Amino acid sequence: MNETGSVKVFGREYYIDGPPDQIQRIQRLLDNISARVGEESPRTERRETRLLRGLLLLNAEYEENLECIEAEHRETLVRVQAEHEDALRQVQAEQEEHFEHREAEREESFERARAEYEEALKRSQAEHDENLRRVQAEHDEKLKLISTEQDARIKVIQAEHEEHLVRVHVEYGEKSRRAEETEALHSSVRDWAGQMAERIETALAEADPVEKP
């Protein structure tokens, strides 16, 4: 970091700008020069003037070099910043591309899973419908068989019932006829018994009375 410092030469103080270590080196160089040149004299004065001119040139060169270094530093900084921004944009673009790719994969996976689910649902529904139709057909077939068996059983029962009715009717008619014949026989017997009783009474009435001993 640059700062303003002072250097002394031949009893005079001068202010220069530069890094502290650079100012210290310049001061040591001036001290060596002062020791070699000696005290003030016209010759020394001229040397001092030349020395100051040289210091001014040295300071100008230093400032020029410093400006060049700063310009190069700024240029390097701008280049590095640009490279950093390019790298950042590239990384961001790669991240966005990766995200878009992952998003596309996720959507594709979701669509594939949904299609598989819908297909499985359709198969399950088709199997369910087929099983339902089969069970319904079996149920209808069993109902028809049961209905046929019931109709046959009902017909058999009706025939047995009609046959039983006929047999009962015949038996009832036979019993009725026999009852009528029995009643007629009983009536004939009663009539005959009545007649016999009348004859016996008549015979007894007409017969001679028998004396008792």
Image (cartoon, rainbow, N blue to C red):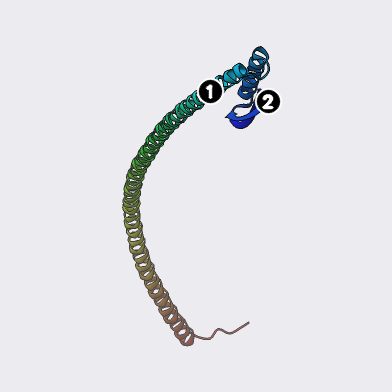
Residue 76: numbered disc:
none
Which residue position holds label 1? 53
Which residue position holds label 2? 11
The image quarter in which residue 43 lies? top right
> What residue is shown at x 66% (from left), y 20% (from top)?
40
Residue 1 visible in this rendered orientation of the protein = no
Dot 2 amino acid type: Gly
Residue 211 visible in this rendered orientation of the protein = yes
Q: Is residue 206 above or below residue 123?
A: below
**SS for dot 2:** loop
Residue 151: give x, y in percent of width and height. 32, 56
Residue 49 falls left or right of residue 186: right
Spatial CA span between label 2 and label 1: 17 Å
Dot 1 amino acid type: Arg
Front-most of residues 127 and 154: 127
Residue 65: give x, y in percent of width and height. 48, 24
The image quarter in which residue 210 lies? bottom right
Mark 2 surroundings: few (<14), some (14-19) or many (≥20) residues within 10 A:
few
Q: Is residue 186 above or below residue 27?
A: below
- Report if the CB atoms under discs 2 and 1 are less than 8 Å apart: no
